[in-house]
DNA sequence: CTGTTAGCGCATTCAG
DNA sequence: CTGAATGCGCTAACAG
């Protein structure tokens, strides 16, 4: 290993000197500009010098010059929620294919952090951004769009966005949750409870709306049994389920706003000496990997997060490539009801 | 939302013009250089112009000039493995504190991807890197170190690294796995099987070594029962467990090289109509969140990944701040045996 | 306290 | 086919 530290790294000028050509030529071979423009002999000499010196392009300089950073950004609430790693992995794989790097931000669904990330994104001069906004409004993306940075949002905004370069990919959360709740009703479970996260994350609202709507439409007058946990995590699910268990009558089935909450609820139910689904049926949302592995395996709704991430990234790169221009697209993705043992 | 697209974004020169000062002054107030250097009135005028124009610094230009990118990189095998999101979240939180952004790479533990990521990292001019290498050797980091980029590695290399700016953070995997296997032996389980991933990821080797050593030392002559899955995932654990179940005699207890594999093994065991731990005891490694939520809850070894990530990031920023200089440090982190219901 | 000047490394005219 | 010159936006001397 080299002893000398902080050797200044070689520039195109250094390579040029070593190869006995001008810096322009180095740039030309590096960018594979017009295969004809540089003679084979020169090209080889330059390549040799590059390998020899261990030259690696300086992204900052290139970015300053070209206006492209080869960076895309991803804003998600929390990588610790198992839905998002898969989503991000999907993005990453596509980005990797295209020679782009991914800058990741966790926002915790907090507006302050979301705005901060947006600012960082602008500063970093990323070429495009995929965001899963919780509190952001469409207008918050205006500066980015004005800079010509395409945006893909996962989820919908209250006001549909048709701004140029502003794409949305989403699931019909309410319909999906509705399907699930109907399944619970069809199985004859009543009364029907729900555990959700306290924050009024618009993303979760659709699920609550679906629960209420189905209860009204097909609940035969049963009252709403809704309990909130602090966070959309297993801890939140556990706490909310505890609360539901203390009520009388207790629910015959519970819809958890996501699988992690369902897993937490499962623990609470077990601790109460009750069995799933014999005493209380339980359903989640997301179909994270462990939903299938749980005991009992979890009835849930699959969103296919990796596919979502890939699709979102593809949409972004279509914008970057100029393949698609103009008004924002709104792409609805399919969901699937997964019936397993828990309900 | 702005209709005009690709408005050129304002530079310091624009701000200067709007505020009626020179571009230097704008730079000064932006960098808060010497509070005394700029008069309060001017500062305010500049701030106003900045807000007015929506000026955001150009990271590329700044990076080119200063040599700092305010970017740190993280190399992990696969964000989809629940251990790593927590690890990365730890890094991210510290980086965020320091005003740095995180560029993330998934390598799948493949040497080709690892090298590619290293190259990308160099190109992006990141200021520091935290890597969880599977196939990389210490020498592969030499170019980065030569550029003056500090490196923190999670895990150990065969040859201890004392190069300047090259820190390592690690757990004594073998000791930890040894503790777990001893626990299994102490409970009187025999014969003792193990499921692991096929790849000879050095990271997992310690666990296998521990299993073999304990078997030799305290196994009273029992033969090794080791089955490999393709990947360190639930699918790999499921497949390997199937294989173990087909053997005769079948194992009384199984140590899975990580929790996801354990969860997969759990499914295989259940499918065989056997119970855990009554028929087969089962233990994992990592203590991912769902280990506690599983049914039965999983006996495992906790590595506290979020804390690991935070500590790794702190070590990196100590280098970046110049608080720590010189030879690489080797920081061993604690583990904890978590005995739950599965074994 | 503020302005002038000079690059950072690169891609790209434009001449030869 | 190759080289010289230019400027992207910014920070940091250095003058005034």
Image (cartoon, coloured by chain):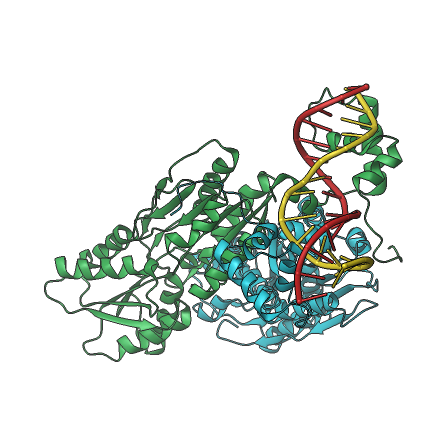
Chain colours: A cyan, B green, C yellow, D red
Question: Horizontally, is A321 left or right of B235 in the view?
Answer: right
**x, y percentage for residue A227?**
61, 55
Above or below, comparing residue A81 to residue B149 in the picture: below
Above or below, comparing residue B267 to residue D13 in the picture: below
Work out whether residue A306 or residue A216 is closer to the camera in this orientation and state it.
A306
**x, y percentage for residue B139?**
38, 53
**x, y percentage for residue A340?**
50, 75
**x, y percentage for residue A243?**
55, 53
Identify the residue shown where x is 51% and y is 55%.
A234
The image quarter in which residue B271 lies? bottom left
Work out whether residue A92 or residue A237 is closer to the camera in this orientation and state it.
A92
Task: Inspect this view and state whether residue A249 appears.
Answer: no
Number of numbered discs overlaid on the protein picture: 0
Work out whether residue A267 or residue A19 is closer to the camera in this orientation and state it.
A19
Question: Horizontally, is A185 left or right of B241 in the view?
Answer: right
Identify the residue shown where x is 22% and y is 68%.
B252
Above or below, comparing residue B186 to residue A211 in the picture: above
The image quarter in which residue D11 lies? top right
Question: Horizontally, is B175 left or right of A310 in the view?
Answer: left
Question: Horizontally, is A6 left or right of A17 in the view?
Answer: left
Which residue sits furthest left?
B221
Task: Inspect this view and state whether residue A143 appears.
Answer: yes
Identify the residue shown where x is 43% and y is 68%.
A295
Work out whether residue A265 or residue A285 is closer to the camera in this orientation and state it.
A285
Identify the residue shown where x is 47% and y is 60%.
B115
């Amino acid at each position: 290993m080299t002893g000398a530290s902080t050797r200044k790294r070689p520039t195109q000028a250094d390579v040029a000197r070593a190869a006995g050509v001008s810096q322009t030529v180095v740039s030309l071979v590096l960018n594979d500009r017009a295969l004809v423009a540089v003679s084979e002999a020169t090209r080889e000499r330059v390549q040799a010098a590059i390998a020899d010196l261990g030259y690696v392009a300086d992204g900052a300089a290139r970015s300053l010059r070209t206006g492209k950073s080869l960076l895309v950004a991803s804003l998600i609430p929390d990588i610790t929620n198992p839905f998002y790693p898969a989503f991000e992995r999907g993005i990453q794989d596509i980005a990797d294919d295209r020679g782009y790097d991914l800058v990741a931000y966790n926002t915790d669904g907090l507006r302050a952090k979301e705005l901060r990330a947006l600012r960082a994104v602008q500063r970093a001069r990323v070429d495009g951004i995929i965001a899963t906004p919780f509190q952001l409004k469409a207008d918050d993306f205006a500066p980015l769009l004005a800079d010509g940075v395409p945006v893909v949002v996962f989820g919908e905004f209250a006001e549909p966005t048709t701004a140029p370069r502003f794409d949305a990919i989403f699931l019909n959360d309410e319909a999906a949750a509705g399907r699930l709740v109907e399944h619970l009703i069809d199985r004859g479970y009543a009364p029907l409870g729900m555990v959700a996260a306290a924050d009024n994350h618009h993303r979760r609202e659709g699920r609550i709306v679906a629960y209420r709507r189905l209860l009204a439409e097909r609940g035969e007058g049963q009252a709403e049994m809704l309990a909130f946990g602090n966070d959309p995590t297993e801890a939140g699910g556990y706490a909310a389920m505890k609360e539901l268990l203390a009520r009388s009558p207790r629910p015959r089935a519970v819809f958890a706003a996501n699988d992690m909450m369902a897993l937490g609820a499962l623990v609470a139910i077990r601790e109460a000496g009750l069995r799933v689904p014999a005493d209380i049926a339980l359903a989640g949302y997301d179909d994270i990997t462990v939903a299938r592995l749980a005991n009992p395996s979890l009835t849930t709704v699959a969103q296919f997060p990796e596919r979502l991430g890939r699709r979102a990234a593809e949409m972004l790169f279509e914008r970057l490539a100029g393949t698609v221009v103009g008004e924002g697209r709104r792409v609805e993705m399919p969901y699937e009801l997964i019936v397993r043992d828990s309900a």
